[in-house]
Image (cartoon, grey):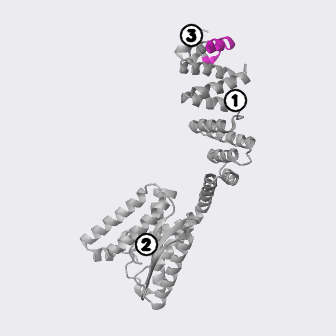
Amino acid sequence: MFFILPYRIDRAFKMPWATIGLIVLNTVVFSFSVTIGLEWTIAAFGFRMGPWAPLTWLSASFLHADLLHLLGNMYFLWLFGSIVEDALGPWRLLAVYIVGGLVAAISHGVVMLAFVPGAADIPMIGASGALAAIMGLFAVRFYRTKIRVGYFVWFVAMIRYGTFAISSVAGVVLWFARDVVSGLIGIGLGAAGGVANWAHLGGVVFGAAIGLLSGQIRSASTEYLADDAHMYAATGTHEVAAAKYAELAEQDPQNPEWRRRKARELANATTAAPDSASAEYGHAIRLYVQGRRMPEALDTFIEADGRLGTLALDHPLLLAVAAEAERRSDWPTAERLYLHVADERGGTPAAEKAIFRLAHVYLGMGDRERAQSTWAQFGDLHPSSEWMAFADPALRALQP
């Protein structure tokens, strides 16, 4: 006797509410079926080809022959559905489950009519066709993710058991091959058998096709590239990590996080490249500001400032970061940035705004003397400034 069972997938996931909902719905339907009569329910709502078949395409994916059948399918739905839902979202998971179940049912019916017509009237039930679609999509989306499998072997007096890891693609391909063999044997014997192998095959092919056509390979490759970059960064292989983050930045040029991480690795590298790191930090800050993600922009500036000491940014960016520092009551950072712009851009609109805000910073710091001095300087330099109307009433009370 040989028995294997996947028990864990090496990937974390958030609470899979759609998967839980499907499990609850399948359980409720089974309980109701037992209450009103399981055999009658299967005969009435199990899938079979015929003029009324469309009515059973959906219902068949929620019916089960017995408790063991239900528990087995729900176990696999939890194992694979939770991971797919985390990547695709709940609505797409539900769509794959429902449409995959329909495709699986049609695949089973067509093969039965073509090769085993005597079995075409036997109702087909179970969520396994829909699960096969989810597994096919899983194999494409998580082609490098490992599935942990337990095994038990009992041959005469020999007993062996343990665990091993297998890639998702290999696991689904082996399962696919098993169904092909079993399905061909069933056709050769002229019997449908107890397992709807061709429904499984139709489902898994549908799921894999959806994964390929919807660009899941690209999403997966990006995710795996990010995993590799994080791993190299964590182990101190900064040059390789920087190169990986550079690839990610090329693939997703509007994502500032890859620029920020690349800059961090360049700054930490054995042969540090401060100029390149500074440029990448600046690029990241610009993208954060453009996306109105000001807290991240300020955090990136503080990180870069701490690592490199200097950071070349244009004055609109400096003003934007300074405004966020002021909003966060990070007075030292705001003061330093406003002073920098005011000193470098004397007489310009940028300097005008910097001095105006600098007076507010000193007011926020509780330094009334410097607030009054800066406000007086602002009044002398820009007596007709439009910013006057936006001054804090406490500053207006400090006559220039």
| Label 2 Cα neighbours within 10 Å, binned few <14 / some 14-19 / many ≥20 | many
Which of the two discs, 2 and 3, sits closer to the camera?
3
Q: Earlier in the sequence, mark 2 or mark 1?
A: 2
Residue that badge 2 annotates: 128
The picture quadrant where one finds residue 63 is: bottom left
Magenta stretch: give its range.
373-387
Rounded to the nearest angstrom, the CA distance separating label 1 from label 3 is: 28 Å
Q: Quadrant of residue 237?
A: bottom right
Residue 237 on the magenta segment: no
Q: Could you say whether the residue bearing mark 1 is in a helix, strand or loop?
A: helix
How would you classify the magenta stretch by its main secondary structure?
helix
Residue 35 screen position, x and y as percent: 24, 70
Q: Dot 1 corresponds to which residue?
A: 315
Identify the residue at horizontal 48%, vertical 61% (top origin). 83
Q: Is residue 195 visible?
A: yes
N-terminal of the two: label 1 or label 3?
1
Tag 2 secondary structure: helix
Does residue 222 appear left or right of residue 162 in this picture?
A: right
Q: The residue under label 2 is which amino acid type?
A: Ser
Badge 1 amino acid: His
Check disc 3 and report the residue beneath it.
398
